[in-house]
Image (cartoon, rainbow, N blue to C red):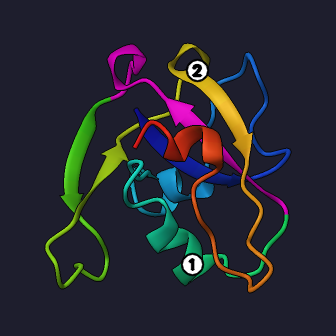
Amino acid sequence: MILHICVDGDWRPGAAYRPASLDSQGFVHCSDLGTAHLPANRLFAGRTDLVLLCIDPEKLTSPLRWEEGDPPDPAGIRFPHVYGEINPEAVVATHAFPPAPDGTFHLPAVLAERG
C-alpha cells in the first residue's frame, strides 16, 4: 500500500483524483507506511484538515515509480510517485490524518499496526 496526503474534501469518492502537483511536477507525491510522516511534518505541520488516501498499487492505471524525494533524503529514502491521475478503484481506504498535540504527524493507529 502507498499513501497520499491530501486536504479533506479534495478527494471525491468515485472520481479520479488529480492534485495540482500532477500539472506542476508531472506526478502525484506519495509515501509508504514508514515515510508518510516525513512530508507531513515538513510540509503540513499543525494542519488539521488532512486525510490519507490508501492506494493499492496493483489497482493503479497510471505508472508508479519509486524515486528520490526533492530534496533527496540524506538516508537515501525513495518515495512512490504516480505519473497520472489516481483512479478511484485504486483508493481502498481513507483515514483522517490529524496532528498530535505538538503539531507533528504520526500514522493513524489502524495503519501503524500494518507497518
Residue 54 counted in the magenta span: yes
Left or right: residue 76 versus residue 114 is left
Which corner quadrant of the image does residue 35 belong to?
A: bottom left
Residue 16 percent coordinates (x, y): 63, 25
Residue 92 counted in the magenta span: no
Residue 110 percent coordinates (x, y): 62, 38
User: What amino acid does circle 2 point to?
Assistant: Val
Q: Which residue is mark 2?
A: 92
Please identify the residue farthest to the left as the structure is shown. 76
Which region shows up in magenta? Answer: 49-62
Which corner quadrant of the image does residue 67 belong to?
A: bottom left
Left or right: residue 88 versus residue 21 is right
In the rendered image, the quadrant that contains the N terminus is: top left
Q: Which mark is residue 31?
A: none
Assign a secondary structure to mark 1: helix
**Residue at the image point whose x is 84% and y is 61% from the top:** 49
Q: Are marks 1 and 2 in contact (CB under 8 Å)?
A: no
Per the model, the C-alpha gap separating discs 1 and 2 is 24 Å
Left or right: residue 64 versus residue 29 is left
Assign a secondary structure to mark 2: strand
Residue 25 percent coordinates (x, y): 41, 62
Residue 106 percent coordinates (x, y): 59, 64
Q: Which mark is first along the chain, 2 or 1?
A: 1
Q: Which residue is mark 1?
A: 41
Q: Nearer the viewer, residue 85 or 45?
A: 45
Label 2 neighbour load within 10 Å: few <14, some 14-19, many 20+: few
